[in-house]
Amino acid sequence: MEALAKIRHLKGSPRKARLVIDLIRGRNVSQALAILKFTDKRAADPIAKTLRSAIANATFLAEKQNIAIDPDDLFIKTCFVDMGAHKNRRRMRPAPQGRAFREQRHYCHITIMVSSDLPQAGDDDKSKKKARLASGKKTDGGDRKSQTSINPKATKKAAKANEVKEEKINATEEVSTAKVKVTKKAKAEKSQVEDAVEAKKTKVETPVIEELVKADTEKIEEPKAEKSKEAKTSKTEEPKVEEKTEAIKSTVEKSKTEEAVKPQAAKTEEPESEKTAEARTTKVEKPTETKTTKAEKIREDETASILEVEASKEIKDSKAAKDDAKADAKASDAKNVASQTPAERNETKKADEAQLNDNDILERQ
């Protein structure tokens, strides 16, 4: 079990903090706290604070993973100090003879890693052997070579850098595994929510579509019923109008035959005396004049009635055409309601050609 703790932007230079952090590296936690308690340095208190937070992090992780750990058994696996931000941290200090000295403020970052696994015994032996080899090697004859140019400080720094790299790799692996788990859970939850939303949408959309279909069928059936009624009434009215026209034509023909018969009768009565002829002609002319005036009135009435019948037919035909155009427009609008968007519904529509034709007919009348 490993746990990490950091403190950032600590006042003080990293060189001074390293003097304290080197005292507790690789030691037990209780020993390290005792050493920090009795060190007379400015960085001792914040380092002790970070060490306690690392111990608390280790106990929390152990409880989370159901692992039994004794805090006194922990030891400091790695601890190091990094340089903090010092840009724009310069200050001016008064100096003698009206001068001013520039002062640079330094900050540092401290990281401590605590582990419950015991350190391997072979590591110390290997480090000792490397130090001996660095100091000098024996030749075959037993003579020692001069000391090599390898510095022990450089080897220590390289070892520290390797340890830090390994720790970073482990931390990144843990973070990546945690992210993968979280993403999988989030995807599963999203898929469940989307399925539920789609099911609700389908449930809501089906009754709406059924209502639209019913409304369309009702709108289409209503004009059909009206058309059938109008057709029936027109069929019943047509024979009546034809009967009237036939009666009018028969009356006109009778009046024409009577007028043709009267001059023939007048020709047969010519041998009679002039007086009697004049008297008869006067008698005959008067009723013919009255009859002619009556025939003209009848003809005028018949023509007026025929014109009225034709005008009524035209009006009915125009009304039927209007109703048909309106029914077709309603049916097309009802069909396009489902496919139209709100923007298309609000757009201005052009007048139908049927309506324009009807308006032209009415203006002509």
Image (cartoon, grey):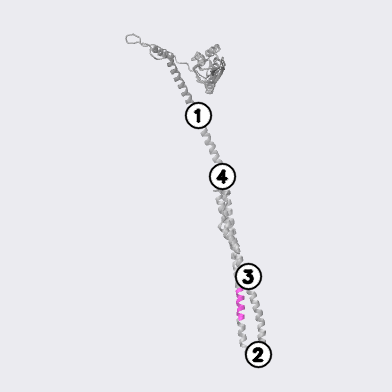
Residue placed under numbered mark 4 in the picture: 205
Per the model, the C-alpha gap separating discs 1 and 3 is 95 Å
Image depth: mark 3 or mark 2 in front: 2
Sequence order check, earlier mark of 1 and 3 = 1
Residue 305 circle label: 3
Residue 298 circle label: none
Per the model, the C-alpha gap separating discs 4 and 2 is 104 Å
Q: Magenta includes 327?
A: no
Per the model, the C-alpha gap separating discs 3 and 2 is 45 Å
Dot 1 falls on a residue whose secondary structure is: helix
Pointer 4 and pointer 1: residues touching (CB < 8 Å)?
no
Taking the image as shown, residue 297 lies to the left or right of residue 73, namely right
Q: Is residue 267 visible?
A: yes
Residue placed under numbered mark 1 in the picture: 179
Residue placed under numbered mark 2 in the picture: 274
Amino acid identity at mark 2: Glu
Magenta-drawn segment: 248-259
Q: Position of residue 335 (x, y in %)?
A: 55, 51
Taking the image as shown, residue 207 lies to the left or right of residue 146, namely right
Crowding near pointer 3: few (<14 within 10 Å), some, many (20+)? some
Q: Quadrant of the C terminus?
A: bottom right
Per the model, the C-alpha gap separating discs 1 and 2 is 139 Å
